[in-house]
């Protein structure tokens, strides 16, 4: 009879373990499968209640991860510290514990409150271990009747606990792998953003990185770009980067400076002309728009276009077609337009000198280049770059910039921006004779009073007194020593005039 019961138990165990293995293999998401494992134990072995608790490695708190036979409120109350109650002791020691009768065991805390009315209930708790490290516990009210020994329950729960431990390990590894993958993706994306730095563009400040990111986003597109910034900030370099990082990079890149061409010439330059269109038009000529067909045209200083040309440019932007000067044939053009200006176009619109509709057509994707005074950290990067460039070009082996020169370069406000830095360094490289750029190689505009020994010769009160004395003497001279007349010319009273003359010991008689 005993053997029969033993045989039936083994069949139940094997069936249960097979079903649990299938449940755990179905997903590495522990939250989805552990509840199903507990339900399977209850179905096959008659478990009344069961829990899986997991240890938080950071907070050292043990909490119920899944439960069977407990309400949501009861499950939420199931929190333990290491060594607290039966569950806390099992997780802390890594050894299973059996409580034959929970009503007679003071260590059994019943934090969930689910067993307050139970009598003669046995409780079994076994550790869940990963590589000898206890990560939680599997607990159950007694599975079988009195005729089955409790140590058999412990053996079965230990096997199930090891299966759950494997699922926990897989989930942790999966989560760690996912976090590592997300971290690597973020690193690669950041590297990609930082690596997209157009050739010949120098700058590592945050404002320049934002410009590079905008370039990376818009370069592959067909969008019209308006580059804005002060003179000398590198707007043409941005236009180059946009073209040579676009699908049109193998086609024409035509540059037009709208401010450099006379108004009578620029229309013909942009749109071309037919033979005989005007005096000197001896043959038909393509304009810059036609020459850029299939590629990109860069219109620098767009704010200098006349109102008439603004209207014609608006048509090109809207219709992508042109008419040559003196012609009546419409010519389609496939091109991308990039424009640049250092003018405040919003103010020009308010004054009526720039068309508002043209502005909105050009301003599809604006890029603002910050002035050098707002990217102070890039000054020495630019200086080093230009030292290397002009040392090679002029075969003058300049190796370093002196400390005093660095102080001058970094304290200057650079109204001419990058172009001014380049000109300044080119001059200094040519003047250097010992492989070092010294402070005296830099232009006078960069020199300070300290570097030239031309500090202030007097204090402010002394300088004001000197100026006041000179004005008094000039007024007396022009009034031939007449204090009253001199006072009127200076806009002061005769009394104050007298006090000032006495203060500076001026002899007014010598001017008569």
Image (cartoon, rainbow, N blue to C red):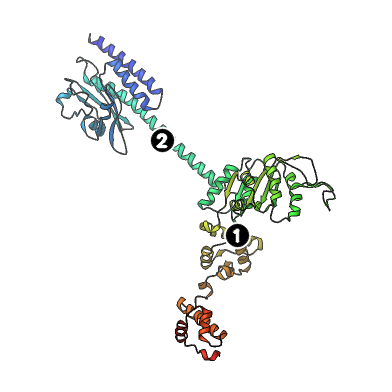
Is residue 289 depicted above or below 21 in this figure?
Answer: below
Is residue 262 depicted above or below 125 in this figure?
Answer: below
In the depicted view, which residue is nearer to us: 198 or 504? 504
As drawn, is 326 to the left or to the right of 485? Answer: right
Q: Sort mark 1 into few (<14), some (14-19) or many (20+) by Cα contacts within 10 Å.
A: some
As drawn, is 458 to the left or to the right of 120? Answer: right
Q: In the drawing, what numbered circle is on residue 176?
A: 2
Residue 59 in the image: state x and y as whole percent.
30, 38
Q: Secondary structure at mark 1?
A: helix
Q: Residue at x 50, y 90 (%)?
A: 507
Q: Quadrant of the N terminus?
A: top left
Q: Quadrant of the C terminus?
A: bottom right
Residue 414 in the image: state x and y as whole percent.
56, 62
Q: Which corner quadrant of the image does residue 124 belong to?
A: top left
Tell me which numbered mark, 1 or 2, is placed earlier along the sequence.
2
Q: Sort mark 2 into few (<14), some (14-19) or many (20+) by Cα contacts within 10 Å.
A: few
In the depicted view, which residue is nearer to us: 486 or 428? 486
Q: Is residue 118 visible?
A: yes
Q: In the drawing, what numbered circle is on residue 386?
A: 1
Distance between the alpha carbons at the discs numbered 1 and 2: 47 Å
In the depicted view, which residue is nearer to us: 49 or 315? 315
Residue 499 in the image: state x and y as whole percent.
44, 84
Q: Which corner quadrant of the image does residue 33 belong to?
A: top left
**Cβ atoms under marks 1 and 2 closer than 8 Å:** no
Residue 26 in the image: state x and y as whole percent.
41, 22
Is residue 31 depicted above or below 239 in this figure?
Answer: above
Is residue 504 depicted above or below 383 in this figure?
Answer: below
């Amino acid at each position: 009879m005993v053997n029969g019961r033993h045989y039936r138990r083994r069949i139940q165990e094997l069936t249960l373990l097979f079903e649990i293995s299938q449940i755990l293999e179905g997903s590495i998401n522990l939250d989805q499968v552990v509840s199903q494992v507990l339900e399977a134990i209850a179905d096959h072995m008659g478990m009344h209640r069961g829990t899986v608790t997991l240890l938080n490695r950071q907070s050292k708190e043990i909490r119920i991860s899944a439960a069977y036979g407990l309400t949501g409120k009861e499950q939420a109350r199931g929190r333990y510290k290491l060594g607290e109650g039966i569950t806390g002791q099992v997780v802390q020691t890594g050894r299973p514990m059996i409580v034959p009768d929970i009503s007679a065991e003071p260590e059994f805390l019943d934090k969930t409150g689910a067993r307050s009315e139970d009598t003669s209930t046995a409780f079994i708790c076994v550790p869940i271990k990963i590589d000898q490290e206890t990560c939680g516990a599997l607990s159950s009210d007694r599975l079988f009747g009195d005729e089955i020994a409790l140590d058999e329950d412990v053996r079965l729960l230990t096997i199930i606990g090891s299966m759950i431990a494997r699922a926990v390990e897989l989930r942790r590894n999966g989560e760690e792998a996912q976090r590592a993958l997300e971290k690597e993706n973020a690193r690669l994306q950041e590297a990609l953003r930082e690596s997209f730095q157009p050739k010949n563009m120098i700058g590592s400040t945050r404002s320049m990185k934002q410009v590079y990111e905008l370039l990376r986003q818009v370069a592959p597109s067909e969008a019209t770009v308006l580059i804005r910034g002060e003179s000398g900030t590198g707007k043409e370099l941005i236009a180059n980067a946009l073209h040579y990082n676009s699908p049109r990079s193998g086609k024409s890149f035509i540059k037009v400076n709208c401010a450099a061409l006379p108004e009578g010439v620029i229309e013909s330059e942009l749109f071309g002309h037919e033979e005989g269109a005007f005096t000197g038009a001896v043959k038909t000529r393509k304009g810059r728009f036609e020459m850029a067909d299939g590629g990109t045209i860069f219109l620098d200083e767009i704010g200098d276009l006349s109102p008439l040309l603004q209207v014609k440019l608006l048509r090109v932007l809207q219709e992508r077609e042109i008419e040559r000067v003196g012609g009546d044939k419409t010519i389609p053009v496939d091109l991308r337009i990039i424009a640049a200006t250092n003018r405040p176009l919003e103010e020009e619109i308010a004054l009526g000198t720039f068309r508002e509709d043209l502005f909105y057509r050009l301003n599809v994707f604006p890029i603002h280049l910050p002035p050098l005074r707002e990217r102070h950290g890039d000054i020495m990067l630019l200086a080093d770059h230009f030292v290397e460039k002009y040392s090679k070009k002029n075969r003058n082996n300049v190796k370093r910039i002196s400390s005093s020169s660095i102080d001058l370069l970094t304290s200057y406000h650079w109204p001419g921006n990058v172009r001014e830095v380049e000109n300044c360094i080119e001059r200094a490289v040519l003047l250097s004779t010992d492989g070092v750029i010294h402070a005296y190689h830099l232009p006078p505009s960069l020199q300070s009073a300290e570097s030239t020994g031309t500090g202030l010769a007097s204090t402010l009160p002394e300088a004001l007194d000197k100026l006041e004395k000179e004005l008094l003497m000039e007024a007396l001279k022009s009034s031939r020593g007449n204090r009253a007349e001199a006072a009127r010319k200076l806009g002061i009273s005769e009394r104050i005039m007298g006090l000032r003359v006495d203060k500076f010991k001026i002899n007014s008689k010598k001017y008569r």
